[in-house]
Amino acid sequence: MADFMASMFGPLPDTVRLLDAGAGAGALTAAFVSRLCQKEDGVRIIEATLFERDPFIQDALLKTMQHCRHVCAEAGIGLTFTIHATDFIHDMSALLTGGLFATIPPAFDAAITNPPYKKIGTDSVERRALRSVGIETSNLYTGFIALIQKLLAPAGQLVGITPRSFCNGPYFRPFREDFLSNLELRRLHVFESRNAAFRSDSVLQENIIFHAVKGRNQPPELVISSSSGEHGDIVTESVLAFGDIVHPHDTEQFIHIPSTPSHTAAKEIMTGLHSSLASLGVTVSTGRVVDFRLKDSLRQEPQKGAVPLVYPCHFDAGTVHWPKPQSRKPNAILDNDETRPWLVPTGVYLLTKRFTSKEERRRLVACLFDPDIVKAKWLGFENHLNYFHANGRGLDRNLAVGLFAFLNSTVVDQYFRRFSGHTQVNASDLRKLVYPNRATLYAMGIEMKSLDLPQEGIDELVTNHLHA
Ligand SMILES: C[S@@+](CC[C@H](N)C(=O)[O-])C[C@H]1O[C@@H](n2cnc3c(N)ncnc32)[C@H](O)[C@@H]1O
């Protein structure tokens, strides 16, 4: 993997100032050096700067770097290196604000990185340090990338491997804006299997490798490639217009990555659709009942004075089956002054899971709430699901069933996978999707006689209507 990443760099200057932030035992720098030594393309000097704060890995890192110096010497390349056994975020943000030594921050021609992944709380030291240099981000990896970007010289190159989560979702929007306005994307590589590349580390995120160059003009086209993530597998490549990856008018700046032919086919079908959820008079929201905040009002079983509380565990064969006997989740919530603001009046609602398991076939799992089956005046939709409604009330049944078919189709699933690498489905992702017009959704809804159709049945129905 390290060698594959190193292979992505374009031509480099005679003297290369290299940065490896979160260097571990130095695998990425070693791969970078080894490539340059084989290439003989004019690089004479490598000045490597490495950050690794783990004291237990310092010996291994030093050994790797001494070996690199030896390999370089044999290839006629001079290598100098500095290992900082310190915190990259702390040191570099202090340097960039002029606090530490008040010197000019270093500029790098190349950076190769596999940064650490961890959520960072609003008040954490890391978050505050990053904020001091104008970076607002909730994960260590995006903090590393944003800092590295600032440390690159003009036309400096960055190859990084990170989770794919930054490509969509509202939390990463400021990061995406910063990234896309200061780095020109040259290549994106995705893995078809979510955990192949990092199986031993039990990283369940989908990962992405990117090659980007410091600058402000995105290229007209870039290379999208994919592989299974297994050792020695085949890499498939295609060239796509930048506008297909980041849509020109998308204020959210989602990064779409069509990595398989079915993703591309899905895009073609979806391009023919023009309705927004808002134009259909439909809104999608995250379930309003946050159970741990209303603990005292939760009831395991239905009782007088309580109303249904719907969780994803109530999804069954396309509809909500409630109550669920021996459920690990409470089935009901008291209807009182404290809870009423979080409840919705009964009606036909379309629900989707916010989190799907790895084993689930689709990312989007939609289910109909049918008030004729579950009878109640008010309902609680729990926070682990999203619900589609009309201004806080239920939907027209045919429209809801049409949406059910559309959202459960393979086309939408494949389209969704172009921009979402993780199993979480945010209400904002659903808001951004394009939908068939009202008449088509109605027609789909009318034709859908059973909600418990096999996948092929749903796909046939949806495809027929979308091609009509
Ligand atoms: C995902 S590992 C990558 C290691 C190596 N680059 C590789 O690819 O094999 C991230 C590394 O960053 C280091 N690290 C985490 N936080 C750091 C920080 N704030 N400053 C410097 N290094 C850090 C960890 O100790 C770990 O070795």
Image: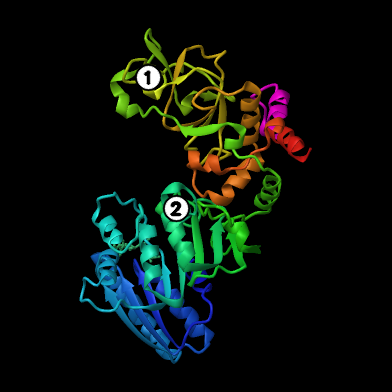
Q: Is mark 1 on a helix, strand or loop?
A: helix
Q: Give the range drawn in magenta.
A: 441-456
Colour convention: rainbow
Q: Is mark 2 on a helix, strand or loop?
A: helix
On whether residue 345 falls in the magenta region, the answer is no
At 35% across and 52% down in the image, what residue appears?
138
Residue annotated with mark 1:
340
Any part of residue 234 in sight: no
Q: Which amino acid does label 2 sit on?
A: Arg
Indicate the position of residue 53 as horizontal and vertical percent values.
26, 66
Judging depth in this view, the residue of 321 and 216 nearest the camera is 216
The C terminus is located in which quarter? top right
| Quarter assignment of residue 290 | top left
Label 2 CB sits under 8 Å from any ligand 1 atom: no
Indicate the position of residue 146 as horizontal and vertical percent values.
39, 63
- The quadrant of the picture showing ligand 1 is bottom left
Mark 1 Cα within 10 Å, few/some/many (few <14, many 20+)? Answer: some
Q: What residue type is labelled 1?
A: Arg
Indicate the position of residue 385 as horizontal and vertical percent values.
47, 31
| Quarter assignment of residue 85 | bottom left
| Quarter assignment of residue 112 | bottom left
Residue annotated with mark 2:
173
The answer to whether 457 is drawn above or below residue 173 in the figure is above
Judging depth in this view, the residue of 226 and 218 nearest the camera is 218
Mark 2 Cα within 10 Å, few/some/many (few <14, many 20+)? Answer: some
At 47% across and 33% down in the image, what residue appears?
285
Per the model, the C-alpha gap separating discs 2 and 1 is: 33 Å
On whether residue 442 falls in the magenta region, the answer is yes
